[in-house]
Image (cartoon, coloured by chain):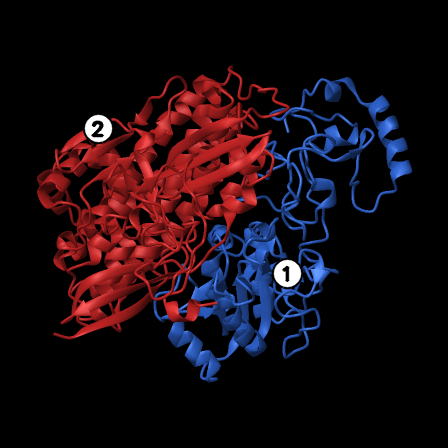
């Protein structure tokens, strides 16, 4: 049995709603088969009031195995945290109190991981993530903060986080599986594949058949702001709601698992150097990429040029 | 006479809600809703490219992001005089209906009915049945709701890529057209959800239930079969009315709806927009210029009366110890306090059963919640019809590129019915970028503070006069507040602290 507390800070509830959409495993299965015991969830629990849960944890009557934080950590105004409170107390202070008690601390979603949409310019609430503000280590708890078992906050990034990524991570923690993390403390089990991988527009991308207006069948990377080739997330290898992904449906990937989401520029326009995107697929050298693209275009079969394939 | 002030916090309201109630001899004499979160969305929008609203505003709310996406899309289309093709309008409507159905079912059986398992009711004859059905994460109806809502959101994903937070509606249409596979898959999902709704929620055939046109017909139909009495709705009706929820929580009688399902041409909507004036019992044509927001009891720089969202100011002005108590503004329709949501939507559309129940018993906690499930039934039927219309329009374009490099300067708005009621986005563009973005959410209407004339908001009105025998377990307040389906994450102006003395920073 693992006690879990899910706390919302500056949130839209989207990660909680996505959690309800998880199907492998589902939240019911987490409770039934992985022994997760929700002491508190803002949308789901009915047995206890938050104050009672807080008292039980702080007094040591209940152990805290997993602390999930959903939402940006509002530090404003003037460092008081009063933009986001519970009974007059800054939520950031409650998070600071609870985090040292937890065996695992998980940032559920990009807001808790990196600040997210609320940290977009001009960051009116002075918000931050738990251990990062965008890609800068630090955040609410500080870069060097560790749980009592020596682990940093696990960043399950995404806006919202992918449903099955959240529940699988929780199942792994409940089973005491080791969690390998990438350089931004995202679990590599879910954050080593690009969104691009598995996109059904890939053949268009392969042959440089790029759309310049929305609503088409081609690739969205060169002109329409898609960040699929730079964004690590399971969106196209583990479909959303069991059905689909944004890029398959013709919606650019806005890079929502990345620390700089949402980018501070027109989100439907790809920044370019000459005719080539300024930001290339992860790890690619520009000169080689340009050579490859020129060849690819020349090799494009007619059925791809004519966009005969439905994504 | 003893007067005490009690602070109450509630979950299962989409976010956390806190409020203060003043009790005199155990009866609520005043109530103040306190939002506890300020997120600054409207400031984040300023200076951004207009289409960014399609990515950023859905993130205002995790449970009704599709409604925000739709409102933002309509506002952008209005400002640039763009008419979307019929096929796109039908797909947008289908997706918003799927989201609303999801919200209605989750609100009913994940947020509202868990209170029926409260220790207060342990001795009630229905207690065991209620626990079997409604215990969080374990009850049979809860399990069915989790599955049905998970499945129905697959329809949004089929057309829009994912739920929550996608951006498939675009000024000029949608990002991809329907095809046979998407339609067949959607029909399969909808058929399964319908079968569950008939078997587990109403305990009978949907057409039969939707044909019930009066309170008498409803209760006669329900009592005619044991399966209907035992169904989720039968259980909800029997218990709610036994504990008197149909006499509890009356708020304002004025109702507001922006109308459901925009039609491809013209201003018409499948369920019409309107304002139900409780004084005259007449439905008036909706006039968005009547919408205005007051700040007399809010922490904003004061101005007299109310201002239309395009004219509104949002200049923080914290005055501790005064009679201001929230950072929420108070929206009014003309000078009227209104409520919005499925009850308003169905009454303004003239739905016979809801109209009869409202005329007989007035608005109340049970009826608001019943109307939500009634709408769920309507949505299942309307989604089937919309899927047929989508199939019939597959040869039409799904997107017509408006060809805009620089967005025109001007003002516009987009109004939709979100799950919780009327949602409006008001937009101003200057020099090709967003100059002002104002969102008035359904919860802003329902949970508004007092206005410059001292009128309480709808939610506050519905609490005042309520006896609270046990402030430590204010179970009736929970029923009343949750029946308004408040979405606190969505109330974007909200800021504050219920201990004002702690807020002096």
User: Is residue B129 visible in the rendered structure shown here?
Assistant: no
Q: Which of marks 1 and 2 is in front?
A: 2
Mark 1 and mark 2 residues within 8 Å of each other at the beta carbon? no
The residue nearer to you, when weighing B322 against B155, is B322
Chain coloured red in this rendering: B
Do callouts 1 and 2 point to residues on the same chain?
A: no
- Quarter assignment of residue A204: top right
Q: In this orientation, which residue lies closer to the viewer: B163 or B325?
A: B325
The N terminus of chain B lies in quadrant: bottom left
Check the residue under mark 1 and report the chain it is in.
Answer: A
- Residue situated in front as seen by the camera: B141 or B435: B435
Q: Left or right: where does residue B354 sit relative to residue B114? A: left
Which residue shows up at 43% across the image and 56% down it? Answer: B317
Q: Mark 1 points at which residue?
A: A155
Drawn colour of chain A? blue
Point out which mark residue A287 bears.
Answer: none
Residue A229, image x, y percentages: 74, 41
Residue A193 in view? yes
Q: Is residue B25 left or right of residue B132?
A: left
Crowding around mark 1 (Cα neighbors within 10 Å: few <14, some 14 to 19, many 20+) is many
User: Is A154 left, or right, of B348 in this rendering?
Assistant: right
Q: Nearer the viewer, residue B479 or A129?
A: A129
Residue, disc 2:
B284
Within 10 Å of disc 2 (Cα), the crowding (few <14, some 14-19, many 20+) is: some
Residue A280 picture location, percent across and down: 79, 40
Helix, strand or loop at label 1? It is strand
Q: Does A138 sit above or below residue A57? A: above
What percent of the width, then of the height, locates residue A165? 59, 55
Among the 4 quarters of the image, the one containing residue A28: bottom left
Identity of the residue drawn at 62% across and 55% down: A157
Q: Distance between the residues labelled 1 and 2?
A: 51 Å
**Residue at the (52%, 22%) spot, across then down:** B80
């Amino acid at each position: 049995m693992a006690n879990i507390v899910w706390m919302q800070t500056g949130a839209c509830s989207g990660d909680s709603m996505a959690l309800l959409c998880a199907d492998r495993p589902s939240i019911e299965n987490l409770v039934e088969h992985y022994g997760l015991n929700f002491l508190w969830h803002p949308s789901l629990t009915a047995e206890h009031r938050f104050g009672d849960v807080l008292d039980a944890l702080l007094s040591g009557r209940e152990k805290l195995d997993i602390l999930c934080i959903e939402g940006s950590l509002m530090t404003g105004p003037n460092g008081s945290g009063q933009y986001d409170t519970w009974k007059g107390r800054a939520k950031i202070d409650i998070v600071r109190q609870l985090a040292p008690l937890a065996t695992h601390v998980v940032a559920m979603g990009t807001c808790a991981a990196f600040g997210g949409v609320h940290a977009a310019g001009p960051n009116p609430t002075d918000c931050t993530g738990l251990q990062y503000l965008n890609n800068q280590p630090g955040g609410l708890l500080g870069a060097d903060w560790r749980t009592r078992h020596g682990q940093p906050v696990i960043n399950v990034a995404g806006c919202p986080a992918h449903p099955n990524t959240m529940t699988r991570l929780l199942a792994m923690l409940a089973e005491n599986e080791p969690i390998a993390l990438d350089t931004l403390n995202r679990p590599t089990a879910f954050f080593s594949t690009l969104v691009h991988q598995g996109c059904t527009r890939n053949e268009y991308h392969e042959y440089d058949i790029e759309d310049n207006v929305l609503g088409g069948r081609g690739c969205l990377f060169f002109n329409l702001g898609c960040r699929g080739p730079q964004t690590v997330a399971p969106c196209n290898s583990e479909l959303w709601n069991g059905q689909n992904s944004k890029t398959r449906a013709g919606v650019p990937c806005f890079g929502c698992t990345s620390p700089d989401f949402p980018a501070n520029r027109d989100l439907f326009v790809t920044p370019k150097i000459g005719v080539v995107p300024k930001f290339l697929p992860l790890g690619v050298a520009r000169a080689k990429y340009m050579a490859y693209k020129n060849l690819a275009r020349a090799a494009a079969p007619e059925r791809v040029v004519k966009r005969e394939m439905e994504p | 006479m003893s007067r005490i002030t009690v602070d109450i916090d509630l979950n299962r309201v989409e976010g956390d809600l806190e409020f203060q109630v003043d009790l005199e001899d155990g009866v609520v004499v005043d109530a103040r809703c306190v939002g506890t979160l300020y997120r600054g969305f409207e400031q984040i929008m300023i200076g951004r490219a207009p289409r960014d609203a399609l990515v950023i505003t859905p993130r205002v709310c995790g449970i009704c992001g599709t409604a925000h996406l739709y409102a933002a899309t309509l506002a952008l289309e209005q400002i640039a005089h763009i008419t979307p093709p019929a096929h796109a309008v039908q797909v947008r409507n289908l997706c918003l209906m799927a989201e609303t159905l999801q919200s209605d079912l989750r609100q009913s059986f994940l947020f509202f009915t868990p209170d029926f398992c409260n220790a207060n009711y342990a001795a009630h004859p229905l207690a065991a049945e209620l626990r079997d059905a409604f215990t969080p994460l374990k009850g049979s109806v809860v399990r069915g709701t989790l599955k049905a809502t998970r499945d129905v959101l697959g329809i949004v994903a089929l057309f829009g890529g994912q739920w929550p937070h996608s951006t498939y509606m675009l000024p000029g249409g949608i990002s991809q057209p329907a095809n046979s596979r998407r339609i067949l898959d959607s029909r399969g999902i909808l058929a399964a959800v319908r079968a569950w709704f008939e078997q587990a929620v109403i305990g009978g055939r949907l057409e039969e239930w939707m044909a019930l046109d009066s309170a008498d017909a409803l209760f006669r139909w329900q009592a005619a079969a044991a399966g209907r009495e035992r169904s989720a709705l039968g259980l909800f009706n029997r218990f709610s009315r036994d504990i008197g929820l149909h006499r509890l929580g009356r708020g304002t009688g004025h109702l507001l709806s922006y109308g459901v399902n925009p039609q491809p041409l013209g201003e018409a909507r499948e369920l019409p927009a309107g304002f139900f004036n409780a004084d005259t019992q007449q439905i008036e044509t909706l006039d968005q210029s009547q919408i205005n927001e007051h700040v007399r009891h809010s922490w904003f720089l004061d101005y007299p009366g109310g201002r239309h969202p395009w004219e509104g100011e949002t200049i923080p002005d914290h005055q501790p110890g005064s009679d201001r108590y929230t950072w929420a503004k108070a929206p009014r329709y003309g000078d009227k306090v209104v409520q919005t949501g499925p009850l308003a939507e169905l009454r303004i559309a003239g739905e016979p059963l809801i109209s009869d129940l409202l005329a007989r018993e007035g608005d109340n906690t049970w009826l608001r919640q019943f109307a939500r499930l009634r709408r769920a039934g309507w949505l299942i039927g309307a989604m089937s019809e919309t899927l047929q219309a989508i199939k019939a329009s597959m040869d039409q374009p799904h997107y017509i590129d408006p060809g805009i490099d620089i967005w025109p300067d001007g003002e516009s708005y987009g109004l939709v019915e979100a799950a919780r009621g009327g949602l409006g986005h008001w937009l101003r563009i200057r020099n090709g970028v967003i100059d002002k973005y104002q969102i008035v959410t359904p919860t802003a209407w329902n949970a508004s503070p007092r206005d410059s004339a001292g009128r309480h908001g709808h939610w506050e009105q519905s609490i005042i006069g309520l006896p609270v025998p046990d402030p430590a377990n204010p179970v009736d307040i929970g029923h009343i507040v949750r029946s308004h389906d408040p979405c606190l994450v969505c109330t974007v102006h909200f800021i504050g602290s219920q201990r004002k003395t702690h807020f002096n920073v």
